[in-house]
Every structure is written in structure tokens, then in C-alpha cells.
Image (cartoon, rainbow, N blue to C red):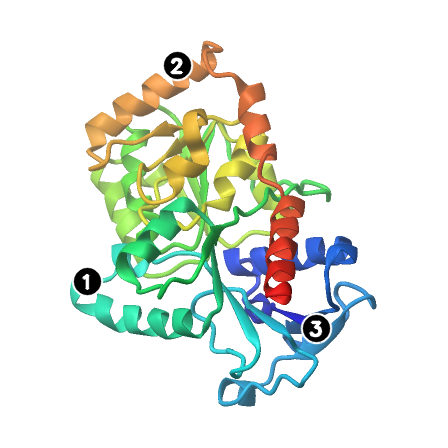
Amino acid sequence: MIVFDCERMKYQNTGLAVFCDNVASSLVRQQSMLGDSLCMFVPARYRGRWGSSVSYRTVLPVYKLHLFCGRNVRIWHSAHQQTSYLPPQGVKCLLTVHDLNFLYEKPISKHPKYLVRLQRRVDRADRIVTISESTKRDLMDHVDLRGKPVDVVYNGLNQFDGDITPPVSRPKGKFLFSVGTVLPKKNFHVLPALLSGNGYQLIIAGKKSPYADRIMDEAARFGVQDRVSIIGPVTEAVKYWYIKNCSAFLFPSIAEGFGLPVIEAMYYRKPIFLSDRTSLPEIGGDHAFYFDHNFDPETMRAQFRKGLSLYDDGKIDTDLMREHALSFSWERTARRYIEIYNEMLSQ
């Protein structure tokens, strides 16, 4: 039996929940390729989510102390690097590492603490996957892999198949959009500067934190606070309305393992403006514009105006942009995981 750890689905509307749900769904659709049966390790409310062709095991707090697997469990796939659920010795462990964001978010003095925790999980793993080459480089530079193989398996594009729903209060006029948990690593506070000298609104969707105050302080500094809205979490249906209808999608994050919203916006052929940090240049490629590395406001405004001008003049091939987004597929992601499972089973 192969167990896929979906414990992080308890945090709805997060990147890890999206990852677990999409990988699990795609594994189920392709499970005939597996060399063993498939089991999902889930919070109680998700039992049965993917039908009866797979088995389910409910997450219990006691499993943090001792995760009893049973003799039929041959591979345990830990779906993220901070997991508290690791299998006992004798069960092969695959670990997916999404990012080492603490290297960019936390003071250097705190790095050793986080690296020790990550090293412990890497030591338990038999094989490791990262979701970008950027994360792989960080892992190889800061953790002793002890010769273990590391594969890069990209995430897939989320294609929303429901009814796109407008928000209760629609923006009046043209707007710029970004989405993500409102934390310092997302670097949203550099965006209000882009509103100087134009009539755009800026809308940021995502769970709020005290960092929202810094964003609004910057908006006040540039005299645009009446055009900046931090609207909190939104449903997928509403999120895609904002993406589909925005004038540009902005994602200035300084610590990103992959950046799912980037390819979601590319699918809708939107002009994309990113930071040049961590994985974003890798994911955006030649189909995005990149802000000044130091986020100088005047330089960012010039880059923003130039990018929009190129886009409006038809100098950006939006068909290639969409093809690039479609090249990221959850089916392909799951197929690669299945290949890795089967390789591990045969060893």
C-alpha cells in the first residue's frame, strides 16, 4: 500500500491544501499505473472525497507521537517538509519539499533551528522531491542529503470548471490584482507605489495579518490609500473573476516555492508582473515582466508602464503565454509521482 499524506487539507484555501487535493485526485484517476494500492491520510471530513477505489486513514493527534502503519504499508508519501507525521523505520518514505522560505523570511540567527528540523525529515526520507529547481538548489546548498536522490516535479495548473462569480461589490474602473496570504514574504507593500500617476485600483485577496497595516501605510505615503483594498480570503469562483477581469496580475513575492497564481493568471492571458526572487523567474519564464530586484518605486513604475505598453501594443504573444501555463499539468505531476513510487517499490 502507498499512503499519500493529505493532512494539510485541514487548512482550506492554502497552497498546500490545493497541492494535496489536486495530486490526490490525479493519482486516483491514474491508479491503474500504480504497483500497489492507494490510501489517503486525511482529516476526518475528507474521508471518501476521492471515491471508493482508494482507502482512507483518519489523522489522529496520537500519530504525531507514533505513526503505526501496519505491514501492508510500503511507501509513505509525506506531502510537505514540515510534516509531523513520519512513518516508522521499515516503511519507505518519500518527502516533498516545497520551499525553504525561512532562508528569506527569518533572521539569519533563526536559520539553524529551521535547518535542524528540515534535516531531521530529510534524514528519515528515502527519496526527495522538490517542486522547483530553485527549491532544489536551496536544499542542496543548506542540507546534507547524504547522497539521496532529489527529483524536481512541478505543480500543475488549476483550471476552474465552476461558474465564475463576481464579488458582491465589484471594482469601479480598472484594477490590478494579487492574491496570497497577507504576510511579509508576499512583499505586497511595494505595490501601492504603482498607483501613482494613474487611476488604477489595487485589490489584494488573502487571509489578513498585521502586515496589512504596512501595506496601507505605504498606500498613505503615496496618497493612494483610497484605491487600495485588502479584501481577505475569497472563494475560488470569485478569485477567478478577479483574475479574468484585472488589468494586470502582480506577484512580488520574495519567497516562493512555486507560485500557483502566476500560471493561473497566465492561463487567462493577463500581463504578469513578478519579483525576480526564488522560483518565480523559473515559473514565469519569458512570459512575465520582472520588477527591479530592490523594488525601487520609481524603477518599478517605469517597468510597469513599459510592460503594459508592450502588452497593449500586441508585442506579447498571449497564445504562447497560455501554452506555457498549460504545460503545467496535475496529471503530469501525478504521473511522475507514480513513476517514483514504482521505482521505490522495485528497489
Coordinates of residue 133 in the picture (x, y in percent): 40, 45
Viewport quadrant of the N terminus: bottom right
Instruction: Using the rendered view, name the quadrant where residue 48 is placed.
Output: bottom right
Name which residue lies at 48% across and 38% down.
Answer: 262
Label 1 amino acid?
Pro
The residue nearer to you, when weighing 179 against 67, is: 67
Label 2 amino acid?
Ser
Label 3 amino acid?
Met
Coordinates of residue 332 in the picture (x, y in percent): 64, 44
Around disc 2, counting alpha carbons within 10 Å, would you say few (fewer than 14), some (14 to 19), or many (20 or more)?
A: few
The circle on residue 107 is: 1
Residue to which mark 3 is pinned: 1
**Mark nearer the viewer, 1 or 3:** 3
Q: Secondary structure at mark 3?
A: loop
**Mark nearer the viewer, 1 or 2:** 1
CA gap between label 1 and label 2 equals 39 Å
Above or below, comparing residue 166 to residue 131 in the picture: above
Residue to which mark 2 is pinned: 309
CA gap between label 1 and label 3 equals 41 Å
Q: Secondary structure at mark 2?
A: helix
- 57 vs 208, left or right, is right
